[in-house]
Image (cartoon, rainbow, N blue to C red):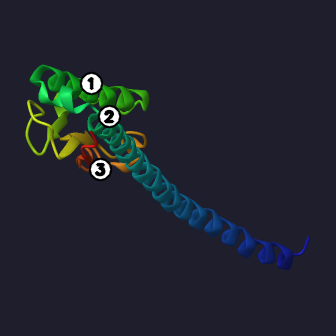
Amino acid sequence: MKTSDNISRFPRWRESGAIVVEMALVVTVLLLVAAGIVEFGRIFWYYNALDKATRNAARYMSSVSRLDMQDSAKAAAAAATARTLVLTAVADNNLSPALAAANVTVSCDGVDCSGTAPTNVSVGIANFQVTPGNWFPFVTVAGGSYGSITLAPATTMRYMN
């Protein structure tokens, strides 16, 4: 084996080491970007599930009979049913943290549904906190998180009966 053969092989070995280092840097950045995309998708999924739940409950409230809405007890029962619809839909989507009944608001023309037939009914969710980094904790700041994002979807529909 000639010395010129050994010298010509050495630069190729150095180049392959540089390729490994560059690949490690690029893959690290790409994994962080992919994890961020997944976390954003998870938060978007949560918002979509919450919005769909409020829409279904508002649709239910808009179809409650006028006579029931004029009776305070029946209107309160309809509002409780709407809250249950929201909580059930959110629980079916396995959102974490779980939604509390206190976070669900049901109103008729901006006030509690009691005694009069409304023009509009609204169902909303208040103060639902989502923390990015729950699925990929290595994306968060060391020893903590980026904070939480408040999701507050609401749906208002015209009262139909």
The local secondary structure at tag 2 comes to helix
Identify the amino acid type marked 2. Tyr
The local secondary structure at tag 1 comes to helix
x and y, in percent, of residue 139 in the image:
38, 50
Towards the viewer: 24 or 108? 108
Q: Residue furthest right?
A: 1
Disc number at residue 89? none
Is residue 12 shown left or right of residue 130? right
Q: Residue at image x 42%, y 46%?
A: 45
Give the residue pinned by disc 1: 81
Identify the amino acid type marked 3. Val
The numbered mark, 1 or 2, whose residue comes first in the sequence reads 2
Disc number at residue 141? 3
Which mark is in front, 2 or 3? Answer: 2
Q: Does residue 33 lie above or below 45 as drawn?
A: below
Mark 2–mark 3 CB contact (< 8 Å): no
- Report the number of numbered marks: 3
Task: State how far apart marks 3 and 1 are (Cα).
Answer: 41 Å
Identify the amino acid type marked 1. Thr
Q: Residue at image x 47%, y 50%?
A: 38
x and y, in percent, of residue 92 in the image:
42, 28
Task: State how far apart marks 2 and 3 are (Cα).
Answer: 43 Å
The numbered mark, 3 or 1, whose residue comes first in the sequence reads 1
Q: Quadrant of the N terminus?
A: bottom right
Towards the viewer: 12 or 117? 117
Q: Residue at image x 79%, y 72%?
A: 9
Which mark is in front, 1 or 2? Answer: 2
Task: Mark yes or no: residue 1 visible.
Answer: yes
Give the residue pinned by disc 2: 60
Mark 1–mark 2 CB contact (< 8 Å): yes
Q: Does residue 113 lie above or below 2 as drawn?
A: above
